[in-house]
Amino acid sequence: MSVDANPQPSADREREQQSLDTAAARNLATTTKSVPQMQEISSRWLLRMLPWVQVRGGTYRVNRRLSYAVGDGRVTFVQTAGRVEVIPAELGELPALRNYADEAVLTELARRCEQREYPAGAVLAESGSTVERVFLLAHGRVDQVGTGPYGGETVLGALADGAYFGDECLTAAEPTWACTFRASTACTVLELTRADVANLAGRAESLRAHLDGVARIPRQRTNKYGEAAIDLIAGHVGEAVLPHTFVDYELAPREYELSAAQTVLKVHSRVADLYNGPMDQTEQQLRLTVEALRERQEYELVNNSEFGLLANCDHSQRIQPYDGVPGPDDMDELLSRRRGNKFFLAHPKAIAAFGRECNARGLVPDAVDFNGHRLPAWRGVPIFPCGKIPLTAQRTTSILCMRTGEDEQGVVGLRQEGIPDEIEPSLSVRFMGIDEQAIISYLVTAYYSAAILVPDALGILENVEVGRRR
């Protein structure tokens, strides 16, 4: 057998390395790095758009003209499985029970509320009939239906979760329903009969005295906003006797105290000393912490139960969509409730749902340029996205519309600039020391709040569906 004296290398034989491998070379190379990234950062349009008022002393008092409109809030319920109960103290939202403080009697009234379920289309109360019970709407939507000028049926308004009607039966002699109340969706309602209240008042002297006192209060002269009327005359001739008047103020105006979002940032001294280039570790830690604080600040401005916009919008400025989905008619209704609308604020999915509704109707929403951003708008009013507005499990959310600024009696943000160790307006970073484990601590604090100067400065389109398609 012959053997080839000069064998050729096999094609599948691994070639010998002829240059430095890139993995090894990378050990000697300088790496270009980005600063730490963070998904939580959003556009935070609400913080940008609110005019911020300097608050000295940490408290902002909103002085208003005296108003007699009370008891127009919402009633809160608790639900256990299929059982719904009203919180006894929440019965104080009814005008007839405002400022009534006997907890035992309120608890008994709450216990006497009977839960009932109404299907869509059911009539809860008929126009012209005697009001015999108070309805507390725990869940669902009820339309107020009347007769139009040409004899046809017309919808006068809509009530939703937390609303009540029929409370006049607690103090008036024989009131009648001014319109028909009809369920437009399946509704869960708690009913408190006039007979039950009268029966309890016969045994609880404090309740009887309170209801009698409310019934004796003379009806105050007010304007359509519930404010004490200012007497004046116009169009007169000759030597008419002019009325005497004055403008009364609220005796106990609301005060907003600045809220705080805080955290303690900790950085090990070894990290700050040895691993501090090319980027300052403390600076990057602080930058991302401040971003998180600002995100939480915007969330609180929307959702906080004390000063948040959703919780503090006046009941009269809350409207319901005509057909569930947010449509042009609903946005027009929201705009018409106030002068000088500056912007809408909506969840991104609500904006998309509004766009689909416009497409279905063959409409093209406006678009406006704002600081280099192309934003959707309606009637020239920009619609800013805000992911902090809640989206419920039923795929419903809210759309806010507001007027802003002190000069316009609108919505304002509150903060106090010039605080110690301030790095941004109303945001401070204070050195707290180094502990025995060589960890450096910094107290990071943001102070803020928001105020609605007059009720019609803010309106909300509630319970808009974002998942239904036509």
Image (cartoon, rainbow, N blue to C red):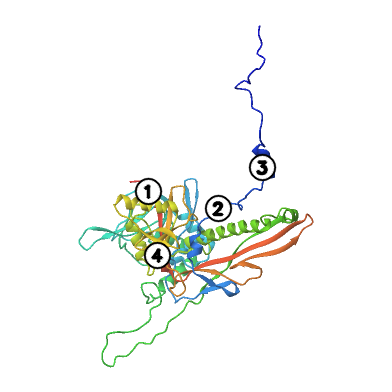
- Where's residue 199, x and y in %? 44, 60
Tag 2–tag 4 contact (CB < 8 Å) = no
On the image, numbered disc 2 is attached to which residue? 40
Question: In screen coordinates, is 174 left or right of 18?
Answer: left
The kind of residue on which mark 4 rests is Ser
The residue lying furthest to the bottom in this view is 239
Tag 1–tag 2 contact (CB < 8 Å) = no
- Where's residue 185, x and y in %? 36, 50
Tag 3–tag 4 contact (CB < 8 Å) = no
The nearer-to-camera label among 3 and 2 is: 3
Between marks 1 and 2, how big is the CA–CA gap? 38 Å
Looking at the image, tell me whether mark 1 or mark 3 is earlier in sequence order: 3
**Residue 422 sits in which quadrant?**
bottom right
The residue lying furthest to the top in this view is 1
| Res 186 label | 1
The nearer-to-camera label among 1 and 4 is: 4
Which residue shows up at 31% across the image and 84% down it? 233
Nearer-the-camera pick, 436 or 154: 436
For numbered disc 1, what is the local secondary structure? loop
Between marks 2 and 4, how big is the CA–CA gap? 35 Å
For numbered disc 2, what is the local secondary structure? loop
Looking at the image, tell me whether mark 3 or mark 4 is earlier in sequence order: 3
| Res 141 label | none
- Where's residue 398, x and y in %? 43, 56
Looking at the image, tell me whether mark 2 or mark 4 is earlier in sequence order: 2
Nearer-the-camera pick, 372 or 105: 372
On the image, numbered disc 3 is attached to which residue? 26
Between marks 1 and 4, how big is the CA–CA gap? 23 Å
Looking at the image, tell me whether mark 1 or mark 4 is earlier in sequence order: 1
